[in-house]
Amino acid sequence: MNDCLFCKIIKGDIPSDKVYEDEEILAFKDINPAAPIHILVIPKKHISSLIDIEPEDEMLIGKIYSVINKIAEQQGVKEKGYRVIVNCGEDGGQEVMHLHFHLLAGRKLGEKII
């Protein structure tokens, strides 16, 4: 999508502080972090939200979770723990309409949400 912020980051039109990249996935530091470690993990394929995942995307989504584990290990937080958040749609708090996973860590994150 031409006007998608994350697609522009993927193309290199907007700079980012990358922590991981391969042919299908990009991960970079959030510019407005909610925790000491706040990394966004996104598919390079434009998928607007969880609602828009198709059956052919299932392997990609599984790979994203594997990459999240790798990043957590690289960041030194795999053992102590971390939180992964995916907001879905406007009422779910999604601000950028490109599927993205928030990896939050680096401090105790508070009470359980559920």
Image: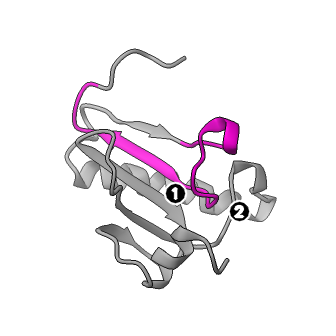
Label 2 CA crowd tier, 10 Å (few <14, some 14–19, many 20+):
some
Question: Looking at the image, which residue is at 79% across and 59% down?
Answer: 54
Three-letter residue code for mark 2: Asp
Residue 60 % position (x, y): 61, 63
Residue 111 % position (x, y): 39, 15
Q: CA distance from mark 1 to mark 2?
A: 11 Å
Is 112 inside the magenta-drawn segment? no
Residue on which disc 1 sits: 64
Give the residues drawn in magenta, as a range: 86-108
Q: Is residue 100 left or right of residue 33?
A: right
Question: Looking at the image, which residue is at 24% across and 55% down?
Answer: 74
Question: Looking at the image, which residue is at 31% across and 32% down?
Answer: 81
Question: Residue 84, labelled with which disc?
Answer: none
Under circle 1, the secondary element is helix
Residue 39 % position (x, y): 36, 53
Residue 29 % position (x, y): 32, 59
Q: Are marks 1 and 2 in contact (CB under 8 Å)?
A: no
Q: Earlier in the sequence, mark 1 or mark 2?
A: 2
Question: Residue 57, labelled with which disc?
Answer: 2
Is 91 inside the magenta-drawn segment? yes
Query: Please, is residue 13 above or below residue 27 in the view?
Result: below
Quarter holding residue 2: bottom right
Under circle 2, the secondary element is helix
Three-letter residue code for mark 1: Ile
Question: Looking at the image, which residue is at 22% across and 37% down?
Answer: 106
Q: Nearer the viewer, residue 25 or 32?
A: 32
